[in-house]
Image (cartoon, rainbow, N blue to C red):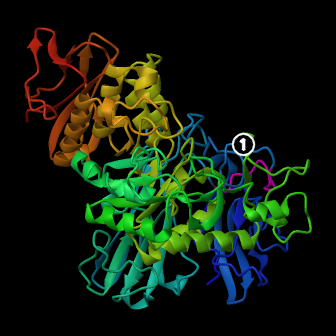
Amino acid sequence: MHHPGPPRFTAAGRTLELAPTDPDPDATYRWRVESAPLTSDVSLGDDPVEFITPDAPGTYVVELDAPDGTHRQTIRAFPGELAPAGTGGGVSGMSGFASGSARPTGQSGDVTGSGSGAGSGGGDGGGRPRIQLHGAVEGDTVVIRADPQTNPNSNKPRESLDVEFLVDDRDDLSQRDVTVDGWELRIPVSALPKLTRVHAVAVGESYSVPDAVAIERGEISSSGRVDVEGHSSADADADISIVRLNDPPAWSTDVTLYEIYVRGFASDDEEADNTFEALTKRLDYLEELGVDCLWLTPVLQNDDAPHGYNITDFFDIAEDLGTREEYEKFVDAAHDHGMKVLFDLVLNHSARQHPFYEDAYKNPESEYYDWYEWQESGEPGTYFDWEKIANFDFTNLEVRRHLLDAVDTWAEIADGFRCDMAWAVSRPFWTELHERLKTRDPEFLLLDETIPYIADFHDLAFDMHFDTTLYFTLRQVGRGAEPAEAILDAVEQRTEVGFPDHASFMLYLENHDETRYIVECGDPEAYAAGAALFTLPGVPMLYGGQELGQLGRRDALAWEHANEDLRAYYESLIDTRNETDALRYDGEFSRIDYEAESDRVVAFAREDGQKYVVALNFGAEPAPVEFGVSVENHDVVSGERLEADEHGLYVDHVAVLPVDE
């Protein structure tokens, strides 16, 4: 089916990309505007991938003539003054660092709400609201209820928020059977087709990131989500499931992630026949540490840059690592150790040594010339003046087809994708990929690397996001450039820029691109920052060797120089998070009153039934802290009592203390 996908929410003056899904590069596709507001003059061209900029508020319907018929897509455009602030330039939401691009400039692609701190709202500055949809079967009616929330910076009451619903254009449901009353949408059970998807936004001083649910009838539906453990609800009718489409896979919120730099992590093993065998031999160690999800840096054929991100063949494993069979054997072994495996998916570009690029360079007659973006100079489009890669042109259907086929190939093996440079890739392409993968496996994880993070990427695109804001803040705190309490601001910024409450975040201190935290900030700071990963809301990620005190960024692990105390410390942090519900995904996060003599100390609360106070100390010496609530003097991380005097309880690097109820 070539339908362009779910309905879209945007603002007048913002540009959206329109593209057929599952494209056939040899087919003909034609777009037209079927209806628009009376004052609109908007029109579309003749390309298979088009761009539309609503020029008046209201509802637009575009039609796509495709080989399998004519498809309609609804676009709801709000007044321009409601557009969320902090939007990255470019159709994909990119930050504008391209050295050359075929994409239209100054366009948002409906990607808004970055984590840069540039702003989070439209209108008179209150910020983006948030929304969640929930459903139930009540008698002979399905009821979808919206739960809108104002932005933390807004002074408007929750009751002032409106909710706008759109039923998916792809679903065979008559609008006559849909009743909307305020924050509720109702559909008679008798009118339901096999699959109905409902989308909605909250509207106040701006409009929210959309949320969506699927109403499914029968044991099997085209979404593949019926009766999937952890996703289905509405037990009142065994034939109907109501599924939240933007919730992360249940398994993904409980794991400890571990990044493996594939050409360094086990490169000291001289006995293994290939890299994947060497990595397999380290699985016992990782299991003992408490790791249960692995992210491997790219494993595909590349231009011999050791990081592997410059791909020369999207369908073949790099020869220096092993074969596809050996990679699959490693994944199977990881599964046997109770670990999931994430495949590092690189879609924005290829290496300049890719045979398609080599054929296309300075050769407009090449069949691959239109696969790439080109500058006026004849050089390829790229970001940050990177010299070894060339950006793909996603307006080319052959590019989209090639990459979708690659996605299908590796999704058969991995449990999820870590999506490289997600901000630079066509936004509708991510929505297509999301639906393509979730249809087959609702538990497949999509993790985006977007710097700074983008709130709209949690709308039918990604399940989990790099918390780049917290990363930079932890670096600032570690260097002494910010007080420790800035960490709390970083966590709260997620909501301020419009991320919904169900969004999931990956917390990290370092990765293969960054200087080791312990090198840049110091030992005491590294202990406290490490504890932050396991006590703040989110999913902790360790970079290979972080737990050993590794100093080199991409070196073989220095096992003989491992800091065993640090490793034991991380084991205790992992155990504490695994055993303490309040520290996990569903645990509530809040500020508390506390007093400390040093601004290197911060305290906050986590709660899921039992409430705990967490204190972090980035200083070199234990620091006294007094809390505004009564706590038990029993640190669940160390299992010991803290020293205490008239100044308070003395916290070394971290303390997690139960609150006396």
User: On the image, which quarter does residue 73 sit in?
Assistant: bottom right
In this rendering, the answer to whether 538 lies above or below 470 is below
- What quarter of the picture does the N terminus occupy? bottom right
Q: Residue at x 8, y 28 (%)?
A: 640
- What quarter of the picture does the C terminus occupy? top left
Residue range of the region highlighted in magenta in the rendering: 101-110
Q: Residue at x 45, y 83 (%)?
A: 195
Q: Residue at x 27, y 10 (%)?
A: 597
Q: Residue 84, percent across and down? A: 60, 46
Q: Amino acid at mark 1?
A: Trp
Q: Does the rendering let one see residue 538?
A: yes
In this rendering, the answer to whether 377 lies above or below 75 is above
Q: Nearer the viewer, residue 161 or 500?
A: 500
Q: Residue 622, percent across and down? A: 22, 15
Tell how many labels: 1
Q: Is residue 352 left or right of residue 215?
A: right
Magenta stretch containing residue 102, yes or no? yes
Where is mark 1, residue-wise?
Answer: 386
Q: Nearer the viewer, residue 552 or 220?
A: 552
In this rendering, the answer to whether 577 lies above or below 276 is above
Q: Residue 456, percent across and down? A: 55, 53
The secondary structure that dominates the magenta segment is loop
Q: Nearer the viewer, residue 211 or 401?
A: 401
Q: Classify 10 Å Cα crowding around label 1: few (below 14), some (14-19), many (20 and above).
A: few
